[in-house]
Amino acid sequence: MKLFVYHTPELTPTEEAPECAIAVDVLRATSTMATVLAAGGEAVQVFSDLDQLIEVSEKWPAQKRLRAGERGGAKVAGFELGNSPLDCTAELVAGRRLFISTTNGTRALQRIQDAPIVLAAALINRAAVVKFLLEKQPETVWIVGSGWEGSFSLEDTVCAGAIAHSICQQSNSSLEEITGNDEVTSAIALYSQWQNDLLGLFHQASHGKRLLRLECLEDLKYCSQTDILDVLPIQQEPGVL
Ligand code: 3SL
């Protein structure tokens, strides 16, 4: 298995595809998706365009759907949910499909949706993703960070590092054996330095600071936890996990 890390959807190659591609948006889209599926959500359907989300979700029975919209960290007016995983309780989401559009995370998923296997990963479900990869042994794996509007993000990179670090350890592979590009090495180095203070890292991150200005400290705390949900968000059909 060779791992490749790409920091943003824009930096992800377009002319080739891996056997498995993983979208990461720790703050907060893929953390929210993992939470919804772990809480019994029927599925998560992602959209980059809000109007398209409304059009498609209108065809779904109202009691079986939830609509989540986030732009710039804030909830989009008229949507039931923004992008806080803490709002996704079992009482609310069980048996319902989440139709979601966020600034960066849903774009990352759409960018990789043609790969044969597509996953969504966050720190909270890192172990489930790693377990799947070790069992399935895809030849090439791309881990694609969502970043923020085309820029690098610390939180997605540290999650990529957490996945790569765990694969290295559990498969008894050397770094050299699993590393497909330099970004993997730097992601593992970032994780190794901050693994015992991921919340501290989020406080340094530009998007972490943005969310703190929006009074989302509890979201940061929740998303900084590792391996708390045994859930594997895996694409069933393009755009649907
Ligand atoms: O950019 C995104 O997709 C979101 O996860 C951003 S936020 O955490 O909801 O602000």
Image: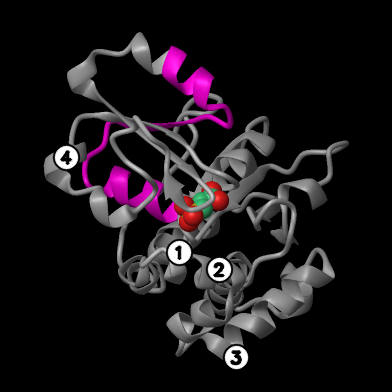
Q: Relative to 135, does residue 190 appear above or below in the rendering? A: below
Verify whether residue 145 appears in magenta.
Answer: no
Which residue is identified by label 2?
159
User: Pointer 3: residues within 10 angstroms few (<14), some, or many (20+)?
Assistant: few
Counting residues from the start of the chain, the first of labels 4 and 1 encountered is: 4
Instruction: Say how many tags the image has.
Output: 4
* Residue 167 image position (x, y, % from top left): 57, 70
Verify whether residue 33 appears in magenta.
Answer: yes
Q: Cα distance, mark 4 to mark 3? A: 37 Å
Name the disc covering residue 239, or none.
Answer: none
User: Mark 2 touching mark 1, by CB under 8 A?
Assistant: yes
Name the disc covering residue 126, or none.
Answer: 1
Counting residues from the start of the chain, the first of labels 1 and 3 encountered is: 1
Chain part drawn in magenta: 30-55
Q: Nearer the viewer, residue 215 or 165?
A: 215
Hey, what amino acid is under mark 1?
Arg
